[in-house]
Image (cartoon, rainbow, N blue to C red):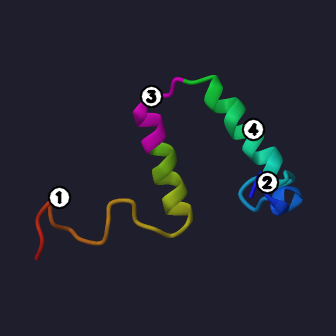
Amino acid sequence: MAAGPGATMQCASAPGKTFAQAAAAIVAQAVTGPYLLDEVFRDAERRLLRAGINPGGYSNEPCGQTI
């Protein structure tokens, strides 16, 4: 979206920015890394929860086991 015809459209995940501006901000932030994996995991978990998705999955069984 950031490089195509939709580049000037408003980005829903970055209010007040276009897709091109949001992409540029992501690239600029990535350049300043490195990031600890636990920070990445926490951020992903928070985003999943905001979207109504359980980051732990739907089963209460330990990983790798199926019912």
Residue at screen point 47% across, 39% down = 40
Q: Who comes first in sequence, dot 1 or dot 2?
A: 2
- Seen in the picture, residue 13 relative to 30 is either above or below; the reply is below
Residue 33 % position (x, y): 57, 24
Amino acid type indicated by mark 3:
Leu
Residue 45 % position (x, y): 45, 52
Q: Who comes first in sequence, dot 2 or dot 3?
A: 2
For marks 2 and 4, give the CA distance. 10 Å
Magenta highlight on residue 37: yes
Q: Which residue is mark 4?
A: 25
Amino acid type indicated by mark 1:
Cys
Between circles 4 and 3, the one closer to the viewer is: 4
Q: Which residue is mark 2?
A: 19
For marks 1 and 2, give the CA distance. 37 Å
Q: Who comes first in sequence, dot 1 or dot 4?
A: 4
Amino acid type indicated by mark 4:
Ala
Q: Residues within 10 Å of mark 2 (few under 14, many from 20)?
A: many
Q: Who comes first in sequence, dot 4 or dot 3?
A: 4
Q: Which mark is residue 63?
A: 1
Q: Which residue is mark 3?
A: 36
Give the structural element (helix, strand or loop) at label 3: loop
Question: What segment carries the magenta color?
Answer: 34-41
Q: Who comes first in sequence, dot 1 or dot 3?
A: 3
